[in-house]
Amino acid sequence: MLDLSRDYDDLREQVLAAIGGVCDSQQFVLGPEVERFENEAAAFLGAEHVIACASGTDALWLALAAVGLGPGDVVITTPFSFFATASAIVRSGARPQFADVEPETLNLDPNTVERALQSAARVRALLPVHLYGQCVDADAFRQLANRHDLKLIEDAAQSFGAEWDGKSSGTLGDAAAFSFYPTKNLSAFGDAGCVATNERKIAERVRSLRNHGSRERYYHEEIGANSRLDGIQAAVLRVKLRYLESRNTARRELAQKYDHLLDSSGLTRGEDAPVRLLAVRQQSQHIFHQYVIRAHYRDELRAYLADRGIGSAVYYPVPLHLQRCFAYLGYSEGDFPVAERAAREVLALPIFFGLKTEEQQCVVDAIGNFYCQH
């Protein structure tokens, strides 16, 4: 499913030299290497401020807390995302409220959000997710946020380098959270994340909250958390950031190759096609953190591929509104049918730096052979 060694082998000498520099400096937590990464990441995104932290999960919480969310507040988000999207809302003291996703992209649907806003109370923020590396309809969400006086927070964990209508993911709302988990397009050698924002007050509060609520050592204005980025992770990220644009371009080319191979095989043709592709919006520059298809007999197909040494993954098998820990929210099966159907159909195929055309052909051939038998 993912061969990280190909990326490491390509950048090995640069990465090891960068790590050695941090070891020589003995500046292991925050420090100059983290500051340099923050400045370079901000320049890449076109954001005024980037504040590095310990993980993408922490970045979500920091962004939500920094805009002032707390007990009694409601945040509307998607039920079709990684768990941290909703858990960060709860961690901030607020309550998640879900709205269904678009069938074409599986991103949060602004139309379902607008309907939810008509009956919801105490909504303070919107938290759309740029799923699989494609931005949501940022224009529609910005209009909703402005019309209802809401904060717009981007869950951009999967989308560093993606764009909507020429504007970078991370600059489309009031604040955004990124993850640099080792599987991400821009990846660290462990957990790491950041918050991006164009608002100085939000940035200042994030910097305080990530460091135990302290702006000056041993003086604490509020209770924050220990979510400081390590210098070694920043050094790794600085090396990889230099190659991110070309790596993202290569992923788009891999995705286009999959599209062509699947179409040429006939697997995506006709109303009853066994494989369906997700749409890419015209305004979107997709970075394909994942290449995801919708497949008939998804679980059987995945087992068939595994038997032939081909990795795949399901992002995500259980929508958030049906997770046991969120039972207190009162949702039940059938409340968000598009997300629920997606959870039964989605399958991510191998996509990573160094993936070869013949390997992609092998994947598509195996999928074709499976459906010849079903």
Image (cartoon, rainbow, N blue to C red):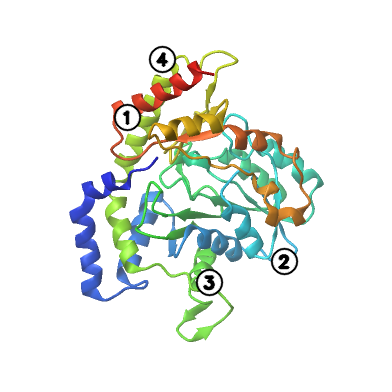
Question: Label 4 sits on what residue type?
Answer: Ser
Question: Label 2 sits on what residue type?
Answer: Pro
Gap between marks 2 and 4, in whole Å?
53 Å
In the rendered image, residue 193, in percent from the top left (x then y), is placed at: 44, 59
Lower sequence index among marks 2 and 3: 2
Q: Which mark is residue 71?
A: 2
Q: Is residue 336 left or right of residue 291?
A: right
Lower sequence index among marks 1 and 3: 3
Residue 179 seen from this side:
yes
| In the image, residue 173 above or below residue 290 | below
- Residue at position x 40%, y 40% in the image: 1
- Residue at position x 33%, y 72% in the image: 31
Q: Which mark is residue 209?
A: 3
Closer to viewer: mark 4 or mark 3: 4
Gap between marks 1 and 3, in whole Å?
45 Å
Q: Which mark is residue 264?
A: 4
Gap between marks 4 and 1, in whole Å?
16 Å
Q: Residues within 10 Å of mark 2 (few under 14, many from 20)?
A: few
Q: Quadrant of residue 310?
A: top left
- Return the residue found at the far front: 307
| In the image, residue 320 above or below residue 36 | above
Lower sequence index among marks 1 and 2: 2
Disc 1 designates what residue? 359
Q: Using the image as rendered, state which of residue 309 and residue 8 is in the foreground.
A: 309
In the rendered image, residue 260, in percent from the top left (x then y), is placed at: 40, 20
State yes or no: discs 1 and 3 in contact (Cβ < 8 Å).
Answer: no
Question: Label 3 sits on what residue type?
Answer: Leu
Q: Which corner quadrant holds the C terminus? A: top right
Lower sequence index among marks 4 and 1: 4
